[in-house]
Image (tube, rainbow, N blue to C red):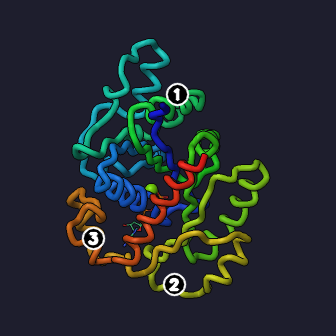
Amino acid sequence: MNNKGTSICITSAKGGVGKTILTLNLAGLYATLNKKVLIIDFDLSGGAIAAALNLTYQKSVYNFVDDYNNNRYKEFKNYITSYNNKIDVLPSPKDPRQAGKINPKYIEIILDKAVFNYDIVLIDTNSNLSEINILTMDLVDNLLLVVTNDPLDLKNTRSLISILKDVNFNNYKVLLNESVNPFKKYFSLYDIKNIIKSNIDYVLSKDLYLKNIDSFIMNGEIMTLDDKASTAFPKDYTTMMQIITDIHEKGDKE
Ligand SMILES: Nc1ncnc2c1ncn2[C@@H]1O[C@H](COP(=O)(O)OP(=O)(O)OP(=O)(O)O)[C@@H](O)[C@H]1O
Ligand SMILES: [Mg+2]
């Protein structure tokens, strides 16, 4: 029997589209489904997962790589910081200068150890097409590409999708996130599909826009772990659950 966990990378063509919040929300939903989740923060130079969750931590991706490289590595769990009994985090480096010292050859080792130890591995990234991000996109089971109704983001997404097609990455789904810019209504769904030359698989609506998101972040809370989440934004709660269902149904077919 193969007990390997499922890996999901959340990426985008532009910054500030809601990747980090989505990563946390998916982690929350998986935790409610009783899955053991690891969030890896591969936004190496500007990672926000540990900060968003108010985690104090000693070890990061950098320490893993540094120890591995110097034969000091013993156990994966030594690099993990727990958020609760279901959600763990492998944080990005504390000092952004350490990001440049991470050799891409360790990415596969980190992901292998992660899926060996967890049911679900969620990877937050940044929007640079760096070697590390490309490798991650190639290695994961599922790729969620987050796009907003911002013209620059849409143009960049079109280029990113054409690159994904060129290199035969077929494991991606496109998610339109209307919850970061709920007041932007310039493009219709039809326009957006035309600009990015791709289908939209999921839409997170402006209903998910939370006026008090800052208080969640200040308190280190995850929206989907709130008792009222499924009634506060029922449609988007269902959409996020659907993303999870689709990922696992696909896995079962393979
Ligand atoms: N559902 C939401 N409601 C209100 N604000 C939101 C929501 N989701 C995201 N935001 C806000 O939008 C901003 C960008 O979100 P986030 O940090 O998740 O984007 P990102 O794609 O991870 O950005 P980066 O590329 O810089 O890492 C943040 O200030 C966040 O608080
Ligand atoms: Mg982010």
Which residue is labeled 3 in the image?
A: 229
The relative height of residue 106 versus residue 214 in the rendered view (above or below) is: above
Quarter of image, res 145: bottom right
Q: Do residues under tags 3 and 2 come within 8 Å of each other at their CB atoms?
A: no
Q: Amino acid at mark 3?
A: Ala
The relative height of residue 166 versus residue 199 in the rendered view (above or below) is: above
Q: Residue at x 75, y 55 (%)?
A: 165
Which residue is labeled 2 in the image?
A: 184
Quarter of image, res 221: bottom left
Q: How many C-alpha atoms fall within 10 Å of the one at disc 3: few (<14), some, or many (≥20)? A: some
Q: Position of residue 16 (x, y in %)?
A: 48, 64
Q: Nearer the viewer, residue 34 or 12?
A: 34
Q: Nearer the viewer, residue 184 or 225?
A: 225
Which residue is labeled 1 in the image?
A: 109
The relative height of residue 93 versus residue 158 in the rendered view (above or below) is: above
Q: Nearer the viewer, residue 253 or 247?
A: 253
1 vs 2, front mark = 1
